[in-house]
Image: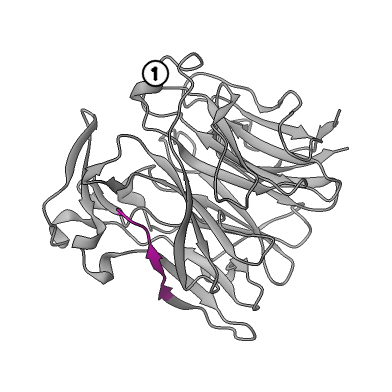
């Protein structure tokens, strides 16, 4: 049984005293830069379509997370290192008010909640400049980053307007793209598509694959929303599967973790597995009774870690090369009342064969005067 040991928290940054709004000082991301330093990025705006593409905060560590220095975004570009030596970094374009965009007729107007109306459109009805799918690319041997638009071939692709904003969604998630063993790039997104003239009733997971260094992408496969109605009384009313995380496992398979938590409240997380390089996926099964923004990585010792939560935040480990049998989860942040503990989004980055760095938010971390404030922290997770 793997033994998980948590290091002491290291404080990165804290919100102003009294700030309790949902969104600021949340949603951390970790990556390793080309020079070996670690880059941490986090959100400081509202959790809203209106905040898509707005500036985030950044910090760098040159000692594997022991100390940190705040920096500007241009100093902290890592991206995914490709086999050809290029680095690829997704760009979240800033949302535009619907009055700034010439909108076609929607295919569907959906009321997710009284204050959340979503207009769904055919992506094909929009001009190319509104397609999104934007990247920054640093070519091998060069210093400059160049913005470019990828070609994404997704049948039935949609666009949305929510909160009166055109959101350039769906889009690639920062830090979610991965290199497959064959050198291709994979990305998993959650979205609905238009199939046989109708918008799919729930979000499904679409796997996209690029074999030309990220210039173009095609659909590899799809995981359809298939809930466990015994595990979730709200299963038929859920938004569907969202926030997919996948990991190339030691046994050669691919494991995917999925969120269902939505406006209806806490929902189970699920797992699904592919044994044919992502061409098909097993029927989803419940992974835990909760889990937003799951993250996974396999360390050099062959142990795979997962982090997830809401409420609370947890890490979990498995020695199973397939990832089918997991040990009990270990508490990182104790669960509390809604939005009083942590956003439960986290990030994992391998430090060595036995240790990962975990980044997360803690809404009750004391400052030097003992005042509890929303904070971004990191700590080591060692598993042996």
- Please indicate whether residue 359 sits to the left or right of residue 166 in the image: right
Instruction: Give the image quarter of residue 273.
Output: top right
Inspect the magenta stretch and tell me whether residue 158 lies in it. Answer: no
Q: Residue 240: x, y in percent? A: 40, 33
Q: Find the magenta span and give its range.
A: 148-157
Q: Residue 132: x, y in percent? A: 34, 64
Looking at the rendered structure, the number of numbered marks drawn on it comes to 1
Position of 324 relative to 160 (above/below): above
What colouring style does the render use?
A: one colour
Q: Is residue 13 visible?
A: no
The residue depicted at 13 percent of the width and 62 percent of the height is 102
Position of 14 relative to 334 (above/below): below
Question: Is 370 or 3 nearer to us in this picture?
Answer: 3
Q: Residue 87: x, y in percent? A: 59, 73
Q: Please, which residue is most extreme toward the bottom here?
A: 141
Question: Is 5 or 89 nearer to us in this picture?
Answer: 89
Judge the density around disc 1: few (<14), some (14-19), many (≥20) Cα neighbours within 10 Å: some
Question: Is 221 or 68 nearer to us in this picture?
Answer: 221
The residue depicted at 53 percent of the width and 74 percent of the height is 212
SS at circle 1? loop
Q: Which image quadrant: the N terminus?
A: top right
Question: Is 37 or 264 nearer to us in this picture?
Answer: 264
The residue labelled by disc 1 is: 234
Instruction: Give the image quarter of residue 290.
Output: top right
- Please indicate whether residue 152 sits to the left or right of residue 299 in the image: left
Q: Which image quadrant: the C terminus?
A: top right
Q: Is residue 101 visible?
A: yes
Q: Residue 22: x, y in percent? A: 42, 36
């Amino acid at each position: 049984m793997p033994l998980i040991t948590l290091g002491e928290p290291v404080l990165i940054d804290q919100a102003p005293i009294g700030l309790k709004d949902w969104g600021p000082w949340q949603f951390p991301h970790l990556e390793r830069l080309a020079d070996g330093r670690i880059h941490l990025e986090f959100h400081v705006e509202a959790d809203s379509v209106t905040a898509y593409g707005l500036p985030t905060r950044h910090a760098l560590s040159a000692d594997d997370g022991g100390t940190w220095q705040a920096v500007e975004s241009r100093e902290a570009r890592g991206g995914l290192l490709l086999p050809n030596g290029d680095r690829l970094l997704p760009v979240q374009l800033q949302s535009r008010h619907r009055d700034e965009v010439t909108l076609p007729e929607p295919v569907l107007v959906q009321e997710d909640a009284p204050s959340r109306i979503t207009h769904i459109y055919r992506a094909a009805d929009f001009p190319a400049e509104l397609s999104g799918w934007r990247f920054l690319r640093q070519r091998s041997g060069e210093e400059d980053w160049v913005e470019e638009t990828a070609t994404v071939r997704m049948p039935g692709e949609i666009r949305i307007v929510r909160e009166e904003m055109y959101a350039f969604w769906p889009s690639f998630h920062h830090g979610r793209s991965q290199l497959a063993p064959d050198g291709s790039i994979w990305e998993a997104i959650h979205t609905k598509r238009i199939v046989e003239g109708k918008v799919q009733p729930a979000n499904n997971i679409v796997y996209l694959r690029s074999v030309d260094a990220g210039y173009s992408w095609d659909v590899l496969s799809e995981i359809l929303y298939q809930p466990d109605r015994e595990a979730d009384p709200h299963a038929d009313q859920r938004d569907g599967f969202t926030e997919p995380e996948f990991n190339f496992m030691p046994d050669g398979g691919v494991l995917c973790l999925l969120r269902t938590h939505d406006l209806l409240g806490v929902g189970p997380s699920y797992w699904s597995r592919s044994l044919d390089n992502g061409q098909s996926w097993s029927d989803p099964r419940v992974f835990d009774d909760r889990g937003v923004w799951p993250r996974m990585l396999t360390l050099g010792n062959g142990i795979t870690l997962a982090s997830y939560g809401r409420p609370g935040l947890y890490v979990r480990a498995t020695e199973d090369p397939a990832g089918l049998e997991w040990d009990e989860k270990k508490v990182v942040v104790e669960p509390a009342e809604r939005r009083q503990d942590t956003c439960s989004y986290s990030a994992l980055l391998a430090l060595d064969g036995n240790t990962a760095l975990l980044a997360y938010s803690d809404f009750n971390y004391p400052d030097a005067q003992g005042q509890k404030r929303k904070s971004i922290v990191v700590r080591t997770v060692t598993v042996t």
